[in-house]
């Protein structure tokens, strides 16, 4: 049964979005600029975009690149982060490299990657891969480092090999931290996906947005921003729902409301 607080928590994001749209509408009417359409004008352009077959193909192409880059980054970063967390030699070798790469905006690498790989899917997917990898590596590293040595000693006493201890002890114990990194990486995947498509303009949601900007179709520009934002919210909500199911054992649950009175 939903309580007043739970209903308010569920409605808060909706009310926040409605408030933002209202502020946008008021600001656009006050400025009265052709380059800043009202929220209603932008939202009226959304059905025409989603009803256009070519636009849908472009958006699906973006999601495909994002999925490939994200999954490849997760498959690479989790084992590396776990190894770094449990091996001082691996951490000492990888840490300087990651410290050099981390501050560099991944979109800044796009021109170089385009020179090497062209402007096709591979270059965009690689930028997404780079953007997602670092937070997943970091959180996997922190999760593995926090595993108690007693658990590993117990596993060794039971005859588990180092690989088995990594899979059966370190990975499950690190899972809450790993999934936090994956959630951060998912947001970065969306950001780098759009940015890469705006630089290497062949197809995708970023290409639609930039083409509309070139042609002065500002309602389409803002409509695409809304669509991309909605995609991000939907992906984050879906991932968070999955995360809560996978690591429900690690989160405190209270059967009775806490009282501090």
Image: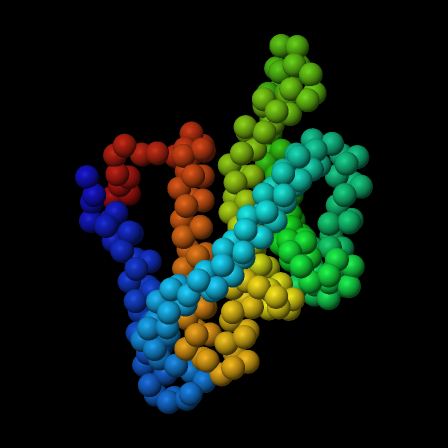
Q: Residue at x 39, y 63 (%)?
A: 50
Kindly indicate the quadrant of the structure image that contains residue 39: bottom left
In this image, 108 relative to 215: left or right? right
Q: Nearer the viewer, residue 62 or 11?
A: 62
Is residue 184 visible in the rendered structure shown here? Answer: no
Applied colour scheme: rainbow
Kindly indicate the quadrant of the structure image that contains residue 230: bottom left
In this image, 235 relative to 18: left or right? right
Q: Position of residue 87 (x, y in %)?
A: 74, 32
Give the quarter of the figure containing the N terminus: top left
Considering every residue shown, the one lying at the far front of the view is 53
Q: Is residue 242 above or below residue 96?
A: above
- Count numbered badges in the picture: 0
Q: Residue at x 66, y 34 (%)?
A: 79
Q: Position of residue 258 (x, y in %)?
A: 28, 39
Q: Residue at x 77, y 49 (%)?
A: 97
Q: Position of residue 181 (x, y in %)?
A: 56, 45
Q: Nearer the viewer, residue 199 or 5?
A: 199
Kindly indicate the quadrant of the structure image that contains residue 76: top right
Q: Residue at x 51, y 61 (%)?
A: 58
Q: Nearer the viewer, residue 55 or 251?
A: 55
Give the quarter of the figure containing the C terminus: top left
Q: Position of residue 34 (x, y in %)?
A: 42, 87
Is residue 197 visible in the rendered structure shown here? Answer: yes
In this image, 42 relative to 154: left or right? left
Q: Is residue 234 above or below residue 90?
A: below
């Amino acid at each position: 049964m939903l309580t007043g607080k739970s209903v308010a928590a569920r409605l808060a994001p909706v009310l926040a979005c409605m408030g933002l749209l209202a502020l946008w509408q008021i600001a656009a009417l006050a400025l009265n600029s052709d380059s800043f359409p009202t929220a209603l004008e932008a939202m009226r352009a959304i059905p025409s975009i989603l009803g256009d077959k070519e636009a849908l193909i472009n958006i699906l192409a973006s999601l495909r690149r994002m999925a490939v880059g994200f999954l490849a980054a997760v498959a690479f970063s989790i084992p590396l982060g776990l190894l770094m967390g449990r091996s001082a030699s691996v951490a000492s070798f990888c840490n300087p490299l990651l410290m050099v790469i981390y501050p560099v905006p991944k979109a800044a690498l796009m021109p170089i990657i385009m020179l090497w790989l062209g402007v096709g899917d591979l270059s965009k997917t690689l930028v997404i891969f780079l953007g997602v990898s670092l937070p997943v590596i970091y959180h996997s590293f922190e999760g593995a480092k926090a595993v108690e040595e007693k658990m590993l000693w117990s596993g060794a006493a039971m005859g588990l090999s180092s690989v088995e201890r990594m899979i059966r002890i370190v990975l499950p114990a690190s899972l809450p931290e790993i999934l936090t990194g994956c959630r951060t990486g998912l947001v970065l995947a969306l950001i780098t996906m759009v940015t890469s498509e705006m630089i290497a303009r062949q197809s995708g949601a970023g290409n639609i947005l930039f083409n509309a900007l070139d042609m002065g179709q500002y309602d389409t520009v803002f409509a695409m921003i809304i669509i991309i934002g909605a995609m991000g919210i939907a992906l984050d909500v879906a991932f968070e729902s999955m995360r809560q199911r996978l690591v429900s054992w690690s989160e405190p649950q209270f059967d009775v409301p806490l009282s501090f009175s």
